[in-house]
Amino acid sequence: MSDIFFHITISHFLILAAVLFAIGMVGVLVRRNALIVMMSIEIMLTAGILTILAFARLHGDMGGHAFALVLIAIAAAEAAVGLAIIVAVFRSKRHVDLERLHHLRD
C-alpha cells in the first residue's frame, strides 16, 4: 500500500485548506444565488479553521483547538442569521438573485 496514507503531514492539511478556500472563492465570485454564496463563505471559513487546527496540531497546542471550536460556534450563528435574512428577502422579493438585490431598502 502507498506510504502517503500512513504519513500525513501538515502540508496535506494546508493543501486541503487551500483547495477548499479556492472552491469557496470561486463560488463567491461566480455564483449569484445568495444561498450558494453563503455556502461558499462557509467553505472558506472551514478552510481557515482547518488551517488553525493544522498549526495547532503541529505545535501541540490545545489553545488552537479551543479557538477553532469558538469559530465553529460563530459560523453556526452566522449561518442561522444569514439564512434568516435570505428567507426574509425571499418572502418580500420572491427571489434571492444577488444581481437583482442591489436595492434592499425598497
Image (cartoon, rainbow, N blue to C red):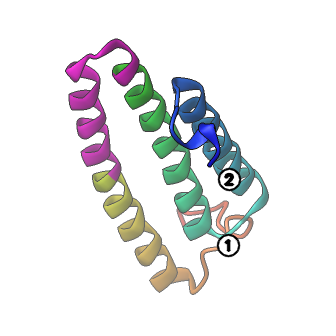
Distance (Cα) linking label 2 and label 1: 13 Å
Q: Nearer the viewer, residue 40 or 91?
A: 40
User: Which residue was labeled with disc 1?
Assistant: 97
User: Which residue was labeled with disc 2?
Assistant: 28
Name the image quarter holding residue 87.
bottom left
Mark 2 and mark 1 lie on one chain; the one further toward the N terminus is: 2
Measured as percent of width and height from the top left, residue 104 is found at: 56, 63
Query: Is most of the magenta stretch helix, strand or loop?
Result: helix
Amino acid type of the residue tagged 2 in the rendering: Val
Give the structural element (helix, strand or loop) at label 2: helix
Which image quarter holds the C terminus?
bottom right
Q: Is residue 90 above or below residue 49?
A: below
Measured as percent of width and height from the top left, residue 48 is found at: 49, 34
**Residue located at (61% from left, 37% from top):** 3
Measured as percent of width and height from the top left, residue 64 is found at: 29, 23
**Residue located at (64% from left, 66% from top):** 101
**Residue located at (51% from left, 38% from top):** 6
Q: Nearer the viewer, residue 45 or 9?
A: 9
Q: Nearer the viewer, mark 2 or mark 1?
A: 2
Q: Nearer the viewer, residue 28 or 6?
A: 6
Position of 27 compared to 56: left or right?
A: right
Q: Is residue 83 above or below residue 73?
A: below
Q: Nearer the viewer, residue 2 or 92?
A: 2
Measured as percent of width and height from the top left, residue 19 is found at: 67, 43
How many marks the image carries: the answer is: 2
Name the image quarter holding residue 58.
top left
**The stretch drawn in magenta includes residue 66:** yes
Give the structural element (helix, strand or loop) at label 1: loop
The residue range painted magenta reads 57-75
Q: Which mark is residue 19?
A: none
Amino acid type of the residue tagged 1 in the rendering: Asp
